[in-house]
Amino acid sequence: MITTTGLTKVYRSRGREVTALDGVDLHVREGEVFGVVGQSGAGKSTLIRCVNLLERPSSGTVTVAGTDLTALAGNGQRANAALRRARSRIGMVFQHFNLLSSRTVQGNVELPLEILGVSGKERSRKAIELLGLVGLADKAKSYPAQLSGGQKQRVGIARALAGDPKVLLSDEATSALDPETTRSILQLLRDLNQQLGLTVLLITHEMDVVKTVCDSAALMKDGRVVETGTVSEVLATPGSELARELFPVGGEASGADRTVVDVTFLGETASQPVISQLSRTYNIDISILGAAMDTVGGRQVGRMRIELPGPFEENVVPIGFLREQGLNVEIAPTGTVPTAAGAAALAPAAALVKEGAK
Ligand SMILES: Nc1ncnc2c1ncn2[C@@H]1O[C@H](COP(=O)(O)OP(=O)(O)OP(=O)(O)O)[C@@H](O)[C@H]1O
Ligand SMILES: [Mg+2]
């Protein structure tokens, strides 16, 4: 539904150059909720602004719903009109709502329809319908100042839906809201995604947002996408940084000569007593140093940091047992450093991750 290829954006100001996007290839499938995460300055907002051509990419292409927007940008009046039309099918939700304080709630939702030249009667019908959809039917005549933050964002979402978009873009739509309101707005986005078949691309710095609503996610760093996939794929990828951030597990080795590994449980494996089986089968004591469990997309997911007695070489067989059960097992980043032989045993997995990140 949304595809970018080699998307690059270089800002030039006062003789300095900032590469905000550095060859981003992104693929968002129709009907999914896709989350982009990354630290401040990673290029997330630049990416979303390039996707609807609010910002002109320096190079690369953006295709939304089969239309190559980059080909339309800036090539004469006819192309500009086509770009405007294409853009009206892309809704945008902002962190600070961007509502006009002098207009009523209904007036704010009608604004994009006025720009599209929709007649007064039809505008009003559509605005009232959309306000019903976001749960604000009774606020049509209120002004933004009379609304809570969550209600303002609902107006922002209703306005974004005015052009019957196929795609909704959201830049930190919930980061100005409290946790409870955040949940209700995320639920609304999820409902709209399902009811209207809307594809949603959202930017966030909150891992909880990804866990709660996203089907897929990408991690950005220094203008690049360094990891991407469905949330399940990401969790099943050895060495995934996204997985570590989604399910952070702490815990240090209790002494020398211990093996500390992080185990990821997905779906059915989450409910099986693999740790006690492991302990019984190999007659070893296992300590749980840290754990995180949650439900993602209706599936039980968890990560656990466990400690096995002895160095890595002595635990190759028990670790193999865990992998045979379908679990993703990796040496914990803060755990005991494996010896050369141990590192070699894990090398293929590490190489795979590097390939996947390209
Ligand atoms: N208009 C601009 N002119 C010059 N540099 C810019 C401009 N907009 C963004 N940048 C730079 O591009 C880089 C990426 O910025 P961007 O706003 O996309 O980051 P972000 O990931 O959205 O960060 P945050 O999480 O803080 O919102 C930063 O180094 C930023 O300073
Ligand atoms: Mg930003």
Image (cartoon, grey):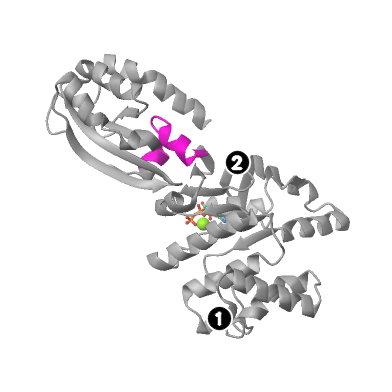
Label 2, residues with CA under 10 Å away: few <14, some 14-19, many ≥20: some
| Residue extent of the magenta highlight | 229-244
Q: Is residue 73 left or right of residue 32?
A: right
Number of labels in the image equals: 2
* Label number found at residue 144: 1
187 or 242: nearer the eye? 187
Q: Is residue 89 left or right of residue 229?
A: right
Residue 66 in the image: x percent, y percent?
A: 75, 45
51 or 28: nearer the eye? 28
* Label number found at residue 204: none
How far apart are the alpha carbons under marks 1 and 2? 35 Å
| Image quadrant where one finds the N terminus | top right
Rendered image quadrant of residue 104: bottom right
Q: Is residue 240 magenta?
A: yes
* Label number found at residue 26: 2
Rendered image quadrant of residue 335: top left
Label 1, residues with CA under 10 Å away: few <14, some 14-19, many ≥20: many
Residue 28 in the image: x percent, y percent?
A: 61, 44
